[in-house]
Amino acid sequence: MAILIGVPTYDDTVKVGLAQAIMQEGQEPGCPPYTVTFKQSSLLAFAHNGLLCTALNNRPQISHLLINHADVVPEPGYLKTLYDEMLRTEAGVVSVLLPLKDRKGLTSTAFLNDIAVSNWSERPRRYTRRRLTLHEAQTLPETFGVGEVAALFGERAERAVLLVNTGLMLIDVQQAWAEQAHFEINDAIDRNADGKFVADVEPEDWYFSRQLAMLGVKVVCMRKVKAMHVGRANFPNSEAWGEWQHDQNGG
């Protein structure tokens, strides 16, 4: 087995810290074997799908795909930690909690209350999506699933979905379900009760998460791996920070 580290990049650039982390990872004790590939595209879902195809087409030599965004810099030993946690939890997908690149402290991990939203263009408006904040995440276990987030938000978990991000995501491509999932961005314009038009979007990682839920794949999110989301500043995932205690736009 080997892990394929797939790096999607918008303009062929990769953060220096990530390049250093990948090169040094093989020297970490217990690091599983890995290889690296890059996919340049201005279309993020297309880049992700290309990386997934590369992993699927190179089985059985490739057993797992680790998507690592070009602006996400993980700590040393991250590959072994992710792989060990996948084995421990028996999850098909493990995602690392990451903050957005602003001062609010929102993350790209969210809770969808109803999996019945299966057709995006005809979706009911009764659903809610609520992002986790870094403050809220610190109250959860280091590795958590939809049940823990549902309990935190006072929701039912039976029909809910944990919407995870692809910034640092390990996918087991050995299973049959890996051939049935893909990444896709869904856009829409809705009209509120006051008559105002509003734009809405389901990003490719959240669409992928809904597919996984419908396929019965176990998905967990973890903050055990420390990482930086790098923009004009470094935004760490390792502590509670940010102006928002909860998602003020959730709903």
Image: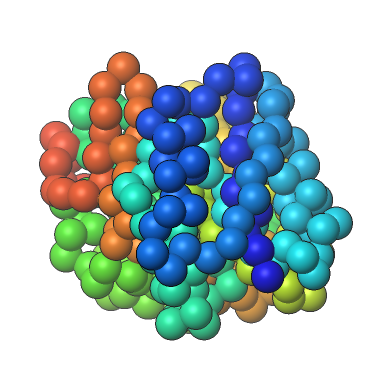
Of residues 177 and 191, the one drawn nearer to the viewer in this rendering: 177
Percent from the top left, x then y, of residue 59?
81, 65
Residue 204: x, y in percent?
Answer: 62, 43
- Colouring: rainbow
Residue found 16% across the figure and 65% down from its top: 139
Q: Nearer the viewer, residue 101 or 195?
A: 101
Viewer-closest of 160 and 75? 75
Q: Quadrant of residue 118?
A: bottom right
Q: Residue at x 43, y 44 (%)?
A: 24
* Image position of 21 (left or right of 124): left
The picture quadrant where one finds residue 191 is top right
Where residue 215 appears, as percent x and y from the top left, is 69, 73
Q: Position of residue 241 (x, y in %)?
A: 14, 41
Asked whether, in this view, residue 44 is left or right of residue 166, the answer is right
Q: Is residue 219 visible?
A: yes
Total marks drawn? 0
Check the image and name the residue furthest to the right. 57
Residue 207 appearing in the image: no
Quarter holding the N terminus is: bottom right
Residue 98, compared with residue 229, is above or below; it is below
Q: Is residue 12 left or right of residue 180?
A: left
The answer to whether residue 138 is above or below residue 35 is below
Tell me what residue is drawn at x 65 percent, y 63 percent. 2
Place residue 47 in its image quadrant.
top right
Is 52 situated left or right of 73 in this image?
right
